[in-house]
Image: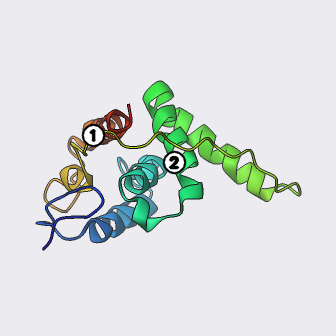
């Protein structure tokens, strides 16, 4: 495998996109501990892999990571619910989130680290997710 252009993960466990698809499959089963972290997973992945999304979405992803660091999963779920409500309303004008600051240091933790061995084991998952969110925030501090 080859090193990821976006986050510099080694690629030893597969591409970051492949790992993300494995994680999404776990998320969508809505099982503990993966399901409740779905919004945070997506935010962390896209902030570290901007080539996989549009710049216009990154502000919302940055808000998710900061919301999690300030208020835990409850804050992430509230942000996600607010976005869904705005999208469902007849008034589709949404308040854009400010763009995240630029990366100033290289990633110290990636989806590869969160996956451990490519399977995202349940044991220690919440701790790894908190570490990943902190690492992403530190990249842009």
Regarding residue 29, the answer to whether it shows in the image is no
Q: Badge 1, how many Cα within 10 Å: few under 14, some, many 20+?
A: few
Q: Estimate the x, y position of residue 25 in percent, counting from the top left.
A: 38, 67
Looking at the rendering, in which quadrant would you find the N terminus? bottom left
Residue lying furthest top: 70
Q: Left or right: where does residue 6 sit relative to residue 63?
A: left
Choose between 30 and 69: the one closer to the eye: 69
Residue at (53% x, 63% y) in the render: 54
Asked if one can make out residue 2 in the rendered structure from this viewpoint, the answer is yes
Q: Which mark is residue 61?
A: 2
As rendered, which of 66 and 122 lies closer to the eye? 66
Classify the position of the C terminus by image quarter.
Answer: top left
Q: Is residue 62 above or below residue 13?
A: above
Q: Give the farthest residue toward the right.
A: 90
First-in-chain label (2 vs 1): 2
Q: Residue at x 21, y 55 (%)?
A: 115
């Amino acid at each position: 495998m080859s090193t990821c252009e976006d986050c510099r993960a080694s690629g030893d466990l597969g591409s970051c996109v492949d790992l993300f698809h494995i994680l999404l499959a776990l998320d969508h089963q809505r099982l503990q501990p993966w399901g409740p972290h779905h919004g945070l997973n997506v935010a962390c992945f896209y902030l570290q892999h901007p080539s996989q999304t549009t710049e216009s979405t990154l502000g919302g992803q940055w808000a998710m990571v900061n919301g999690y660091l300030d208020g835990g999963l409850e804050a992430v779920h509230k942000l996600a619910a607010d976005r869904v409500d705005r999208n469902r309303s007849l008034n589709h004008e949404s308040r854009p989130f400010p763009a995240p600051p630029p990366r100033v240091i290289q990633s110290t933790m990636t989806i590869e680290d969160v996956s451990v061995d490519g399977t995202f084991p349940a044991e220690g998952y919440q701790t790894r997710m908190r570490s990943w969110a902190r690492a992403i925030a530190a990249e842009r501090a």
